[in-house]
Image (cartoon, rainbow, N blue to C red):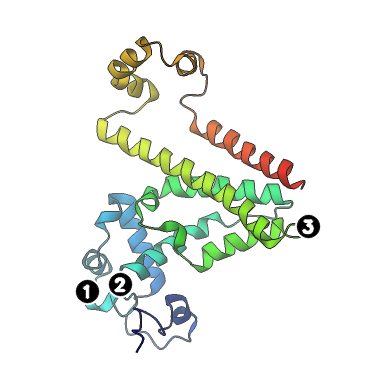
Amino acid sequence: MATQKKGEGEPTLWERLERPSVAARTALSHRKIAEVAVAVADAEGFAAVTMRRLATELGVAPMAAYRYVSGKDDLWALMVDQVSAETAPAGAESGWREVLRAHALRTRTMMLNHPWLSQLPAPLFALTPNRMAAAERQLAALDGHGLDPDTMMAAFRAVSSFVQGFVQSEVAVGQYMKEQGWATGDEIRQGLAPQMTWLMGTGRYPVFQHYALNAAHKDDPAWEFELGLDCVLDGIAARLGI
């Protein structure tokens, strides 16, 4: 006899939220839980978000929260969905490139505002309504250009992967700077000077040394992000002829 996997056959979090609500006995709600969890994570980091901490912040018994979220997976999904709403466009956008580029810029801002996203075990696999809506907008922008479904998805994922990889690295650098007590690029270079001086002194890295001595945007991640993003978009346009 086949063993039923955890959660198999049970309604998902989003199915439960779509159901008609019964009269609430408390002011607790999924949205309120998400708002409080995000606020705690923003202020103190992802590790500070526990069911007991949430119950304290919400002024309820710990078991009360479990009537709304069955565990950490539900809680993570609610948090991701809550902040993903920030990437919704404020106005009309036209053209596949404008849609994908604008979403990428908003995603970078969102991830920098909520650095704990980079600490989630698998943020890319959190299937939530707001994340799906974002994917739908971008795929719809790519649709109608003669691309087959696999190619559309590959183009969409190429941009998403660039954004996720770049910003996760950016967040990691920021966290390391905070741990070291560094606030500026000059302080980073001063802190790393002994290692860098020795490495450059070997003469093995002339191109990197040229960058270190002559680059004008070393402390401008926004410029680097936008240039890298445009390179990805240029590549998609050239390869796919759209």
In which quadrant of the rendered view does residue 187 lie? Answer: top left
Give the x, y percent position of residue 202.
36, 11
Can you tell which quarter of the image residue 182 is in? top left
Determine which residue is flagged by label 3.
146
Q: Badge 1 is on which residue? A: 62
Point out which mark residue 174 bears. Answer: none
Amino acid identity at mark 2: Gly
Q: Name the element at disc 2.
A: loop
> Where residue 2 sits in the image (x, y, percent)?
36, 86
**Residue 15 to residue 188: above or below:** below
Under mark 3, the amino acid is: Gly
Cα gap from disc 1 to disc 2, whole angstroms? 12 Å
Per the rendering, the mark at residue 71 is 2
Give the residue type that dot 1 points to. Answer: Pro
Residue 226 position within the rendered picture, expressed as x and y whole percent measured from the top left: 58, 36
**Which numbered disc flags the more N-terminal residue, 1 or 2?**
1
Residue at 35% x, 68% y is 73
CA–CA distance in space, label 1 to label 3: 53 Å
Element marked by disc 3: loop
Which mark's residue is nearer the viewer, 1 or 3? 3
